[in-house]
């Protein structure tokens, strides 16, 4: 093959070397606009996983890198003068300049032609002459820009300011130095990369940056290689204590805003993107160099394995994209956490430390417990002590009170529509469905959305509370839960609005009924999506009727014995559609700005709160974002939550989306938890209200991690409880917990221990003369001179 590589950074050079190693007959040419000794940045960090791949692919490169590595296992966190060390992690770093020299030498040794100080020919000139053109030309890729219509790039520039610096202070471990200044929170991301220096990245929110006077050079165009010395001097002054008399080192150092790069496609004909040209991930979770070298390995392998360039590039993208997108999801969570780091300034220092470590959701409590048992124990005890709770219980099994309602643990069975009622009446199915979840150990079991009138139903199979027959049927459900378990049961009340009169979910979700449709209403005559009902715009009389329906249903719910009532103001149903500017185009006092859009949902909430017994809590579920342009955002959600809490909501159940069919959610594990986190810190906790996190939470480890970090007070799980109604009790068995937070029904008590399997039923003899002592964390520190040893 004839291969042209635009960009002689680590990704481009590594690809060239790998391809030459696979077949010396390949003719490979690299163009690099900088000199071979030019390099920007200081250190690069690698994971053991990536290093294993490099070792397998090219032992020469790996051995050369290995001899230059700084290695350590600790993370040091200093939060406003409070130091913590967490061990057992595992890091390897080296100077970026050293890495480039290794790859340059390897490429030259293998016969790769590299043109330094030379701009690559135009890609249109390269394409006809080469079998493959690789765009490894970085975040500002000219190749990507030229073929933007084909690659469809998305460049998301973030708000925080950061500057990449170095220091001759050699850190012993990864350093997170979080400093509370008179201007706000600033942080340092630091790590050693050699015997002589460390990376020192300064980051802060824009308002903090301006308040500290670091914006004095804003708008200045620095020539290539020239650093912002005025800002560096100011940083040296602010972080004098952290530098401990050592120098700051510059290398093209100036203020930047991180840009997340994504592309819908990574290849176009015989042109392919690699590294930062294709994708970026925030520096707080890893190295762009690491990702670029992983790209190079995957691309080289696919080119070698497939008979045509097109097949190889398709295979490369198919294999590599899920890995990168997973990394980018973690990076997005991490960068957003650091953008909002000031939110956690009031946390207990140890909890702040745990919060920081688990910010990307890749590290969890169980991970830390395995790596550093002592630190995990500190966090678990601190959580319990802060709330005067039993120390011996995992966080999920600690009790909690919602508006005076005592729950035995922090697990909620999320409302899930079952579409299995006739004329709104719950039957044996609902007794078994909700009763089994109560027997399964959850602290609070929520009904599906119970509709306040026949016209409020989503489908003909929805349950209701508009008559006494339904009330009596619900009494049977609540009686079973109260008589047979120690769980509490909550009623979710709602009105479908413009999403009503549709088929059962398994017959066609959101599709109108074939016959017997009823009229649907909404704040405006706007359908939920193409092919959906067009609602009639509600009049004041319609609103009064809906308020009355909610009041009647709330009173019947109280009579039926529900312990808690949740007003459903999420997911695009009636109250949610009033809240969203996507669905609400009214021009009267119920439309327009957020205060007006809140007016009717708050009227309903106030009426329900008055109708439900004062000693039982009323909560609200909201959609924290509409996931669509011009819709509600997380910023709106904070104000929506604030309004409901001010009106007496004992808890906010934080979901998202389902307001329009045009939504584009950013799905992922625990993907809605950051919304709950923000609402808890900015609204609920200061007011004494609770927050419930929901959305792709499926493991007890994730639940414990969310609770211990202070991101929510309770966790609601839906599909997980469909998969396993006894999920909570099983989680207790897995964690070897026995206590009031997971009380087993007498009939199920024999299941407290995990059943034996082919791997666990053998009883092993003692073969060790001395018993092992409990494992402590591995604390390996970096000290100068170790590489030479």
Image (spheres, helix red, strand yellow):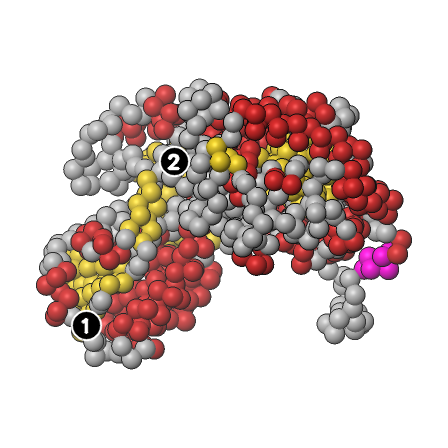
Instruction: State the image coordinates of residue 268 (x, y, percent, origin top left).
Output: 24, 63
Q: What secondary structure is the stretch in magenta mostly built from? A: helix
Instruction: State the image coordinates of residue 447 (x, y, percent, origin top left).
Output: 70, 44
Q: From the viewer's perspective, is 608 left or right of 439?
A: left
Circle 1 residues within 10 Å: few <14, some 14–19, many ≥20: some
Q: Secondary structure at mark 1?
A: loop
Q: Visible in this render: residue 135? A: yes
Q: Visible in this render: residue 7? A: no
* Magenta-colored stretch includes residue 384: no
| The magenta segment | 748-753
Q: Nearer the viewer, residue 260 or 529?
A: 529
Q: Secondary structure at mark 2?
A: loop
Residue occupying the point 32% across, 77% down: 306
Residue occupying the point 35% across, 46% down: 260
Earlier sequence position, callout 2 versus callout 1: 1
- The mark closer to the camera, 2 or 1, is 2
Label placed on residue 604: none
Q: Is label 2 in contact with label 1 (beta carbons under 8 Å)? A: no
Quadrant in the picture for residue 162: top left
Which quadrant holds the N terminus?
bottom left
Q: Which residue is mark 2?
A: 630
Residue occupying the point 78% across, 48% down: 438
């Amino acid at each position: 093959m004839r291969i042209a590589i635009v960009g002689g950074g680590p990704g481009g050079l590594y690809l060239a070397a790998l391809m030459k190693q696979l077949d010396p007959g390949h003719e490979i040419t690299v163009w690099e606009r900088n000199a071979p000794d030019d390099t920007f940045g200081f250190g690069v960090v690698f994971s053991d996983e990536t290093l294993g791949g490099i070792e397998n692919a090219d032992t020469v490169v790996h051995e050369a890198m290995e001899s230059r590595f700084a290695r350590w296992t600790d993370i040091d966190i200093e939060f406003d003068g409070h130091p913590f060390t967490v061990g057992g992690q595992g890091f390897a770093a080296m100077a970026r300049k050293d890495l480039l020299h290794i790859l340059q030498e390897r490429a030259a040794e293998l016969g790769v032609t590299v043109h330094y100080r030379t701009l690559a020919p135009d890609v249109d000139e390269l394409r006809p002459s080469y079998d493959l053109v690789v765009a490894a030309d970085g975040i500002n890729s000219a190749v990507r820009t030229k073929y933007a219509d084909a690659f469809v790039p998305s460049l998301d520039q973030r708000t925080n300011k950061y500057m990449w610096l170095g220091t001759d202070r050699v850190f012993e471990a990864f350093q997170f130095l979080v400093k509370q200044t008179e201007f706000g929170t600033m942080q340092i991301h630091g790590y050693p990369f050699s015997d002589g220096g460390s990376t020192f990245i300064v980051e802060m929110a824009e308002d903090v940056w301006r308040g500290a006077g670091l914006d004095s050079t804003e708008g200045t165009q620095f020539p290539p290689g020239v650093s912002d010395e005025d800002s560096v001097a100011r940083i040296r002054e602010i972080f004098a204590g952290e530098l401990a008399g050592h120098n700051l080192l510059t290398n093209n150092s100036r203020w930047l805003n991180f840009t997340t790069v994504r592309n819908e496609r990574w290849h176009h004909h015989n042109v392919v993107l690699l590294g930062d040209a294709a994708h970026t991930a925030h520096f707080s979770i890893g190295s762009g160099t690491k990702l670029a070298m992983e790209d190079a390995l995957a691309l080289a392998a696919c080119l070698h394995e497939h008979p045509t360039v097109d097949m190889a590039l398709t295979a490369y993208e198919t294999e590599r994209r899920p890995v990168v997108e997973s990394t980018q999801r973690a990076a997005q969570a991490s960068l957003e956490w650091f953008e909002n780091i000031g939110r956690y300034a009031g946390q207990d220092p140890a909890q702040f430390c745990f919060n920081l470590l688990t910010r990307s959701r890749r590290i969890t409590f169980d991970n830390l417990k395995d790596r550093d048992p002592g630190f995990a124990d500190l966090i678990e005890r601190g959580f319990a002590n802060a709330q005067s709770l039993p120390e011996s219980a995992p966080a999920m099994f600690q009790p909690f009170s919602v508006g005076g309602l005592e729950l035995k643990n922090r697990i909620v069975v999320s409302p899930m529509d079952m579409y299995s009622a006739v004329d709104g009446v719950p039957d044996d199915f609902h007794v078994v469905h909700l009763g089994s979840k109560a027997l399964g150990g959850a602290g609070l079991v929520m009904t599906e959305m119970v509709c306040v009138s026949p016209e409020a139903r989503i489908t003909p199979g929805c349950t209701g509370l508009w008559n006494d027959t339904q009330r009596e049927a619900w009494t049977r459900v609540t009686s079973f839960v109260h008589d047979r378990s120690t769980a509490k049961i909550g009623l979710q009340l709602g009105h479908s609005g413009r999403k009503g009169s549709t088929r059962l979910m398994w017959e066609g979700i959101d599709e109108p009924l074939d016959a017997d449709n009823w009229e649907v209403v909404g704040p405006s005559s706007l359908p939920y999506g193409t092919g959906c009902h067009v609602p009639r715009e509600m009049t004041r009389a319609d609103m009064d009727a809906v308020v009355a329906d909610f009041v009647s249903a709330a009173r019947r719910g109280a009579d039926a014995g529900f312990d808690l009532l949740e007003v459903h103001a999420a997911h695009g149903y009636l109250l949610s559609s009033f809240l969203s500017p996507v669905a609400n185009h009214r021009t009267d006092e119920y439309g327009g700005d957020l205060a007006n859009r809140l007016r009717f949902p708050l009227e309903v909430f106030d009426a329900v709160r008055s109708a439900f017994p004062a000693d039982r809590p009323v909560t609200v579920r909201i959609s924290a974002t509409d996931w669509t342009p011009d819709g509600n955002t997380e910023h709106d959600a904070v104000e929506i939550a604030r309004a409901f809490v001010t009106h007496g909501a004992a808890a906010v159940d934080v979901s998202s989306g389902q307001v329009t069919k045009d939504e584009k959610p950013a799905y992922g594990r625990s993907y809605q938890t950051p919304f709950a986190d923000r609402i808890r810190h900015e609204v609920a906790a200061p007011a004494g209200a609770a927050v419930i996190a929901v959305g792709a939470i499926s493991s007890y480890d994730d639940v414990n991690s969310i609770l211990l970090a202070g991101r929510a007070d309770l966790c609601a799980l839906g599909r997980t409880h469909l998969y396993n109604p006894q999920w909570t009790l099983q989680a207790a068995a897995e964690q070897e917990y026995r206590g009031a937070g997971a009380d087993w029904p007498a009939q199920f008590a024999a299941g407290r221990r995990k059943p034996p399997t082919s791997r666990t039923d053998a009883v092993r003899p003692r073969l060790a003369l001395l018993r092992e002592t409990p494992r402590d964390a591995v604390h390996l520190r970096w000290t100068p001179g170790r590489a030479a040893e």
